Amino acid sequence: MTILAQRRVRLFASPPSRMLRQLPKLTLAVDATVVGGATLLAALGRDLLPLFDGGRAVTADLTLVGPAIVLIWLAALTLGGAYRVDMFGAGTEEFRRVLHATLFTGGLVAVGTFFAKYPLSRGFYFLLFAVGVPALLLGRYALRRALHQARRHGRVQHRVLIAGDPAHVDEVAAVLRRERWLGYRVVGAATPTLELEETRAGVPVVGDCGDITAVVREQAADVVFFASGALTSAAQMRRIAWDLEEDDVQVVVAPTVTDVSGERVRVRPVGGLPLVHIDAPRSTDASRWGKRLFDVVGATALLVVAAPLLAVSALWIKLHDGGPVLFRQLRIGRGGEEFGCLKLRTMVVDAEARLAELHAATGHTEGLFKLKDDPRITGPGRWLRRFSLDELPQLVNVLRGDMSLVGPRPPLPQEVAAYEPDTVRRLRVRPGLTGLWQVSGRSDLSWSEAIRLDLYYVDNWSMLQDLSILVKTVGAVLQRRGAY
């Protein structure tokens, strides 16, 4: 097949990739609209708001100043790499480039008007960037959310070939399939030998690592992941990159490291060799005074706000069946210490006595027992669970120091007794009122997935991540994902 024919196959075989290549144009159109709108609003605000001194109306010169600023700003974004295809969809690099380009634009406009002795209004200048910067970032964020949603529905995706040993291919494929919002659709694998038709995880083996270039073109892939076992030498990698240069194929090296946040990874080239440095896990940082202070202040504020709701809920529970309002359950905290976890009672009084019967009926063997239509849940309890109001008393546990606002789910003693050696690591930090498990699906998650998220949180803790989880918790509660 000729190169021209191969490119025709590529064009028609991968419509999602064609859509992906339109992203820079769409983003440019959105940015141009945002910057143009910010320029117009800044001019109108400068003339109409009483905060600024009078003088010549800025809107009178908008036909000259406006287009020039818009073009300079968009040119700075383009030169700063804010429209590269690999910038979209994940990470903070896209937003960082937008901010850097904006700072450059602000400096260039200020210096240019100074040397040109152009009387640019300071009020207009201030409003332009006060409005334009957050508007640009919000526009990019909205596009990213729309892109993630489209990718979850199978659109705007990369066609991915993974090269490497079958076991490592499956590891990479598992991550790409789990994080569907990344937009990587695995079309096949290239392995050192062709002994298998597909890997253990079901990835079809479509070629061998000795002829990756031909396999990539045959599968019309636009991204190739190199996992362990794919290459025999650095020279082979260099030749493959040269061969794929004209095919617009993105080359990605996937090291045998998973569940490590970007803040802990640094790439430092030494003598032409890119060395990946991984910082130490951050579990100790999650136990320091800053997080504890945040927990105490946050829990106190939430208790004050939620006090009326707690009172109404307690009265409802008491009037329903006359049983106790609170349910205290033994849980395991940091370092394996036991504590009484408080919740509003949502089940019948003899719920614990009926647990073994439900285990036998459902075949439950491991992890926290959750049944979607649990017959033990009371009428008030079903409503309280739907909006997670039953967990509000755990704010008292946070004040006591048993728990944190954010952290792994507090486990039962029988769960801890059955832990694998790696799973014990989740006990290095205080359990949380909310966490990655809650914003990622809660009861809809499998046991292994919940453990993976908890371990990721322990090793990659940051205060920014805690704040992000708290914000996402509000959406998870309102949408009632996995709440039963």
Image (tube, rainbow, N blue to C red):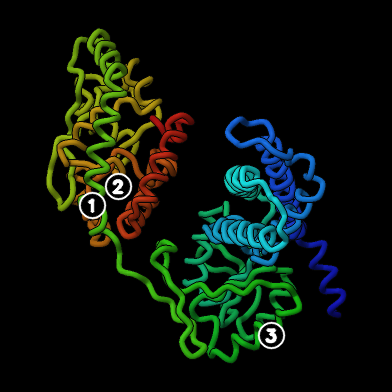
Left or right of 46? Residue 418 is left
Residue 318's image quarter? top left
Residue 95 in the image: x percent, y percent?
Answer: 56, 56
The secondary structure type at the circle numbered 3 is: helix
Between residue 71 and residue 389, name the one nearer to us: 71
Quick one: quadrant of the N terminus? bottom right
User: The C terminus is located in which quarter?
Assistant: top left
Q: Which residue is mark 2?
A: 408
Which residue shows up at 76% across the image and 78% down it? 246
Count numbered badges in the picture.
3
Q: State left or right for residue 141 relative to residue 410.
A: right
* Mark 3 to mark 1 CA distance (whole Å): 47 Å
- Furthest toward the top, the residue is 319
Q: Which residue is mark 3?
A: 242
- Distance between the alpha carbons at the discs numbered 2 and 1: 8 Å
- Decide if residue 368 is on the left or right side of residue 335: right
Q: Is residue 16 visible?
A: no
Amino acid type of the residue tagged 2 in the rendering: Pro
Q: Amino acid at mark 3?
A: Trp
- Pinpoint residue 206: horizontal percent, then vertical percent: 65, 73
Numbered badge on residue 167: none
Distance between mark 3 and mark 2 Cα atoms: 46 Å
Q: Which mark is residue 429?
A: 1
Would you call the spot at circle 2 few (<14 residues within 10 Å), some (14-19), or many (20 or more)? Answer: many
- Disc 2 vs disc 1: Cβ atoms closer than 8 Å? yes
Task: Give the quarter of the image for residue 257.
Answer: bottom left
Q: Residue at x 36, y 47 (%)?
A: 466
Q: Is residue 18 above or below residue 8?
A: above
